[in-house]
Amino acid sequence: MTIQTQQPSRQTLYVVVALILGIIIGELLNLTLESEQLKPVINIFAALTDIFLRLVKMIIAPLVFATLVVGMAKMGDIHTVGRVGIKAMLWFFSASICSLLLGMLLVNGFEPGSSLHIALPEVGTKTGLPEVAPTLGTFVSHMFPKSIIDAMASNEILQIVVFSMFFGVACASLGELAHPTVKLLDSLSHIMLKVTGYVMHSAPVAVFAAVASVITQNGIGILVTYGQFIGEFYLGLLLLCCALCCVGGLFLGRRILSLIRHIREPMLLAFGTASSESAYPKLLQQLERFGCDEKICGLVLPLGYSFNLDGSMMYMTFAVLFIAQAYGIDLALGDQLIMLLTLLFTSKGVAGVPRASLIVISATLSMFHIPEAGLLLLLAVDQVLDMGRSATNVFGNSIAAALVSRWEKSLR
């Protein structure tokens, strides 16, 4: 798939400037406006961000379907698809375990919950989160679509992936007969990437609005109150990225630096909007520019968005142990390891559920008899933490796509 070159450096600069302006304007508004005046301003910022995210979500379903089907049809046989899928899943689970273990080590070493000088919510206080228990049943219901139209309307990426894999294998097995359909979908993928270029022009506005909304609502002082916890969590994300980068460097060599340059804009976009989903179309473009095989990207990225959320995995570990520390609950090492295994599998059971990370954390807290009300400690800074974990999710999926392309000897 040939993609027209643009000027990513200029677009990246615009996003960085938007981030800085969002912080400055947000703090000025927080200091100058009364509390009753803040709500209309925050609503305007929220609307601007929501417009951008809706535009991105508009692209994702047809883009995932078209690229995945075309990629599988061009692979030619089910054995190649299976081999690529197995390599991707092995990497996903390895990276997830690394994220969880690193998070556990850091939060035990730093003990941020023990030093938080904030009044604890009363045990039994409602968190306001929807009660969705992450079970095998919910995982299956979110994995297999009862209607592809419904799955696309809801942007259920995992369901779209499952349908696309059946569709792609069928196209590959039919050969010449399926060529018109494959050609049509190949054309559709090019069109959707062109649409992505148009939508990305509004990315700096969305980043500005998202950051300004957070700072206007909470003030930059919230970063000071939770400074230690936020700083330690972001240090954990940085160490995780470095670890993934080192592993990537073993296979990619110096090209790992080129990969980082290519994905900086999608990462900034995910960071600014606190949504890894918003970076998906741009990430697909940039990985293909880097030299990843379009067929492999079309398969690995959608799977990664369901199974390889490295930043979110670390956040879940941090959050559960942070809340336990805040309430003075000492979890034994064995309990912590069981908690990691629980998070590894239950986090896959709430795909498509709003605020999925918090719901998984809530379910894990109740499982280990830790007050769920402790989640209220995190809600004030969840958006700030979400920015970092979203960018890390994008980074982890980029490494995965590049490595699988390298292992398949199809990295240009």
Image (cartoon, rainbow, N blue to C red):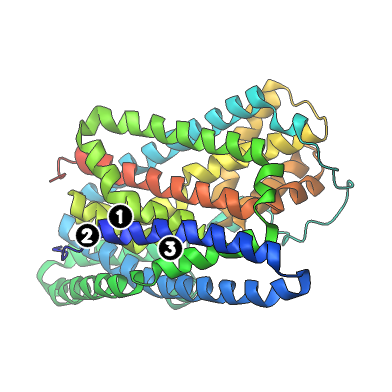
Instruction: Tell me the residue that label 3 is attached to.
Output: 278
* Label 3 crowd (10 A; few <14 / some 14-19 / many >=20): many
Q: Is residue 118 left or right of residue 261?
A: right
The disc, 2 or 1, on the residue closer to the chain's N-terminal end is: 2
Front: mark 2 or 3: 3
- Mark 3–mark 1 Cα distance, whole angstroms, equals 18 Å
The residue sitting at 41% across, 41% down in the picture is 92
The disc, 2 or 3, on the residue closer to the chain's N-terminal end is: 2
Seen from the viewer's position, the closer of residues 153 and 247 is 247
Give the quarter of the figure containing the N terminus. Answer: bottom left
Q: Is residue 226 left or right of residue 210?
A: right
The disc, 3 or 1, on the residue closer to the chain's N-terminal end is: 3
Instruction: Tell me the residue that label 2 is attached to.
Output: 71
Residue 256, by quadrant, is top left
Residue 258 on image: x %, y %: 22, 42
Q: Are marks 2 and 1 in contact (CB under 8 Å)?
A: yes
Q: Secondary structure at mark 2?
A: helix
Q: Is residue 100 left or right of residue 67?
A: right
Q: Secondary structure at mark 1?
A: helix
